[in-house]
Image (cartoon, helix red, strand yellow):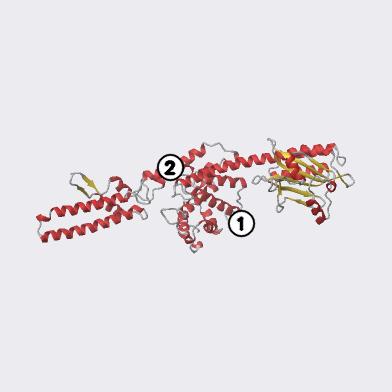
Amino acid sequence: MSHIDTQEVVKQLADLTGALTSEKDHIKLLDRIILGCMYLTNADGGTLYTLNEENENELMFTVLHNRSLGIHRKPKDLPPVKIYNAQQLSSKLVVVQTFVQQETINIPDAYECTDYDFSGTRNFDKQLNYRSKSFLCVPLQDHEGEVIGVLQLINAKDSGGDTIPFPATQQHLVESLSSLAAAVLTKRRLIDAQRQLFESFIKLIGRAIDHKSPVTGKHCEQVPEIAMMIADAVNNARSGTFETKSFSDIELYELRIAAWLHDCGKITTPEYIIDKATKLHTMFDRIELIAGRFREYKLHLELNLLRQHSELSEETFAMAQAKLTEQNRLLDDDLAFIRKSNTGSEFMAPELKERVKCIAKINWIDAQGEQHLLLTQDEVDNLCISKGTLTDDERQVMRDHIKVSTDMLDSLTYPKQLRQVPEIACNHHEHMDGSGYPRGVTGDELSTRARIMCIADIFEALTSPDRPYKKGMLLSQAMNILGRMVEDNHLDPELFKLFVESGTYLKYAKQHMADRQIDDFDASALPGLN
């Protein structure tokens, strides 16, 4: 270690240990450790191999440096090193043997060593006119004693620049420094593992809600896609309101987590309400019960006429038959009207509701003296729903999912970088003018990311092609609805403008909507853009 004095060693070690807390990028930190090892040993080259977590039979090139050859880069195109072959025999490469034997290997001269396979090294030297001579390979062990990588140094140099073997004192120093690299790798892998488990659990909840009912389709899965696309458009804006706005990586991650959790409260919403495809749907669609009553009533009328046949003249009976035929036709019209009303596809005007109530007045008494109604009061109430298929009570239960979501998310303890998740996730039903729910806050009280969620949630619900009870809406229809909501001061006009002008809506459509839904229209003429 004659090329540096003790003070420089101490300074280098202090810099490396200080970097453990100051450097957030673990690859850069590992790079600094390799360079530090090269500096302290005056090595010409240094490589860090790490175990591939997805394929534990491979060592990946993570850091690569060589001063003489001018190589200072993170390898991207170098193939991994196989540890075992098909016969489960370990490779004779020195880096592999260091990994397998879990001990340091110090080779004074690779060209005189016959214990390991250096054929690839010799080919490398021949191609680049280089001479790989001395090697020092040190295994990296985690806190459980598992080898997770190998640190390799090549060609130690003396003060005159000649290649020499790595002295024992340098070997001990590098072995000590390798523990720093192992600690960095272990810390990163533990953090990544916890993060992956956390994200997997969140996605598990979202997918469970999506699978709970075919009506929701892939809503919880697709909303994050739209939200992240809009956030990306904000970051790429070069003019307008968002020219100086940019989300950090942490803020983007927080938005993605919030988007996955935005409907978590639906896990408590009764399935019969989520799945209510028609107004009369409970455990099944009661329209067929009503159709059966219509048939029963028509049969009752026919039997009454037949009972009177012997008491009526032929002319009177013929007139009664004609009247019954007309009555049956009107009943058929009424049933067709009930079937159409049951779908909830059209707005129920007051006169249509009145017709339902008139039909409900029809009743009869059977041969056993029991009274029958053509429509029950509950069926009347459901058929008279003005818009959609839910009653006011059912709609409130459906809306309560956001309150449940808020309670669920507020009950969690978050790390600093995720503390805004409840605010982002639980305000997607709020409006800019304060007319939304559940809190009725205005746009001034909503963060930009919460406003993004408002657009993402509605756009996905409108365009989803996988609802079993409705066809996916045309892209032009969905965009016009969003535009009208902007005009009604429900959605953020600047975000909607960016959504349109950046082409984000079309990018999402091409990736996730059915081809038949993507129609041509003049996006610049959409409402809400002026």
| Residue 6 horizontal side relative to residue 374, left or right | right
Disc number lying in front (2 or 1): 2
Crowd tier of the residue under label 2, counting other residues whose Cα lies within 10 Å: few below 14, some 14–19, many 20 or above: some
Q: Which quarter of the rendered picture does the N terminus lie within?
A: top right
| Residue 38 horizontal side relative to residue 502, left or right | right
**Label disc, if present, on residue 484 of the rendered structure:** none
Q: In the rendering, at what x and y percent does residue 222 appear?
A: 51, 51
Q: In the rendering, at what x and y percent does residue 209 appear?
A: 47, 45
Residue at the spot x=17%, y=53% of the render? 303
Q: In the rendering, at what x and y percent does residue 357 appear?
A: 26, 50
Foreground pick, 248 / 25: 25
Q: Quadrant of residue 416?
A: top right
Foreground pick, 486 / 134: 134
Helix, strand, or loop for circle 2? loop
Q: Is residue 302 visible?
A: yes
Give amino acid for label 2. Thr
Residue at the spot x=27%, y=55% of the render? 334
Give amino acid for label 1. Arg
Q: In the rendering, at what x and y percent does residue 330 appear?
A: 24, 57
User: Quick one: label 2 or label 1, which is nearer the N terminus?
Assistant: 1
Q: Report the residue that reaches farthest toward the front.
A: 87
Count of marks overlaid on the render: 2
Q: Quadrant of residue 396?
A: top left
Q: Is residue 357 visible?
A: no
**Label disc, if present, on residue 269 of the rendered structure:** 2
Mark 1 = which residue? 238
Helix, strand, or loop for circle 1? loop
Q: Report the residue that reaches farthest toward the right.
A: 160
Foreground pick, 328 / 248: 328
**Tag 2–tag 1 contact (CB < 8 Å):** no
In the displayed structure, would residue 410 be above or below residue 529? above
